Image (tube, helix red, strand yellow):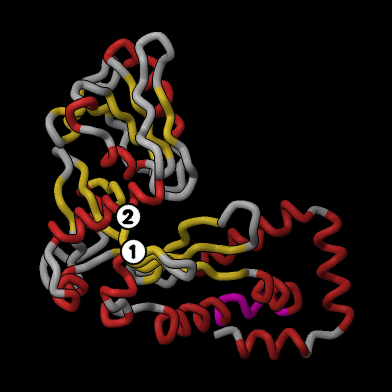
Amino acid sequence: MWTWIRIGCVRLCVWALSTLRRRLELDPTEDLQAFVDEVTEEIHAQGPDCQVRGIVPGTFTMVLSVRGQEVPIQLHNIHRHFVTFPDQLPQVVRQLLLEIEEAGLETPKDHRFVDAAMRILPQICRLDWVYENGPAFGDSALVYREFGSDLAICYVIDDPRSVVFVCHAHLEFWGRTEEDIFHLANQNLRRMSGADLPLPSIDEGPVRVGEGDGYDAARVLLLDPDQAQGLLIAIPERDSLYLGREAHRQSLTMLMASGESAEHPVSRELYRVEGKQLVPVSEPGLE
């Protein structure tokens, strides 16, 4: 995938490498952020099917969403090329996206059920996100179930290279139903999570579930329906789940503000567990 970029980098002269080092030594944070901003702008200019999800913390890896699939891309070689040939960035980005579409995207038949079964996990999304990111009908429609009035449970195949949302073409290829995938995804999440979720006490305040593995919001599915009845739930982002009691409403409202600048926001609503659903509840000042 990176062959042509690697060949180009080998041909760079010592002057180019020393220039890169000097630039990074002057102000590496500002320099690299400006580069990331330019790459992001070029990617978004290619259309709605190409989006930047963010930078993996502690790395120089950008996560792209191309036709609904998340793909991690190392930026080191692109940056080296950019230092010497900044005017070529638009062509480099177009070539990158072309190569991703030709060789980097996966199809349902790339995932045999026997290989994917243990890697299928649930994700909590807003219903309007589901409508915006897939057709309503056909093989490409995302597999989901409603989870209250404005939330949905979707399913992903998670592996080290990419995260692929399960669509109806997967179900047909596997010979499985949404009900099958729902139970399988929950089993996989429970096995990955280990211990039961901690329930909040009135005296100690809300509890935050934050493993940071991308499935914290989905862990609301691990609550025992009987023990969770009446709990207040806040899911401001994919990586945060707050559990509280009625006495914690004000605290939960303040905590929800943390999701306003999140890379993967879910909802600013406050929910109550009723049966096996999350029901939005009115909050003073938000009505």
Taking the image as shown, residue 92 lies to the left or right of residue 171, namely: right
Residue 86 within the segment the image draws in magenta: yes
Question: In front here: 96 or 236?
Answer: 236
Percent x, y of residue 219: 33, 41
Quadrant location of residue 11? bottom right
User: From the viewer's perspective, is residue 45 above or below residue 155?
Assistant: below
State the extent of the magenta-drawn residues as a range. 85-91
Q: Is 45 located above or below residue 26 in the figure?
A: below
Q: For the point 33% across and 30% down, which residue is it?
A: 234
Q: Nearer the viewer, residue 69 or 51?
A: 69
Picture coordinates of residue 135, whole percent (x, y):
17, 66
Q: Residues within 10 Å of mark 2 (few under 14, many from 20)?
A: some
What residue is at 19 percent from the left and 75 percent from the top?
174
Q: In the rendered image, which quarter contains the C terminus?
A: top left
**Which comes before the other along the chain, label 2 or label 1?**
1
Is 223 drawn above or below residue 173 in the view shown? Answer: above
Q: CA distance from mark 2 to mark 1?
A: 6 Å
Q: Amino acid at mark 2?
A: Asn
Q: Quadrant of residue 266?
A: top left
Q: Is residue 48 at least partly visible in the picture?
A: no
Residue 27 lies in the magenta stretch: no
Contact flag, marks 2 and 1 (Cβ < 8 Å): yes
User: What's under tag 1, amino acid-wise?
Assistant: Met
- Asked whether, in this view, residue 74 is left or right of residue 141, the answer is right
Q: Is residue 61 left or right of residue 104?
A: right
Secondary structure that dominates the magenta span: helix
SS at badge 2: helix
Q: Is residue 101 visible?
A: yes
For label 1, the residue is: 118
Per the image, the residue denoted by label 2 is 188
Disc 1 crowd rating (10 Å Cα; few below 14, some 14-19, many 20+) is some
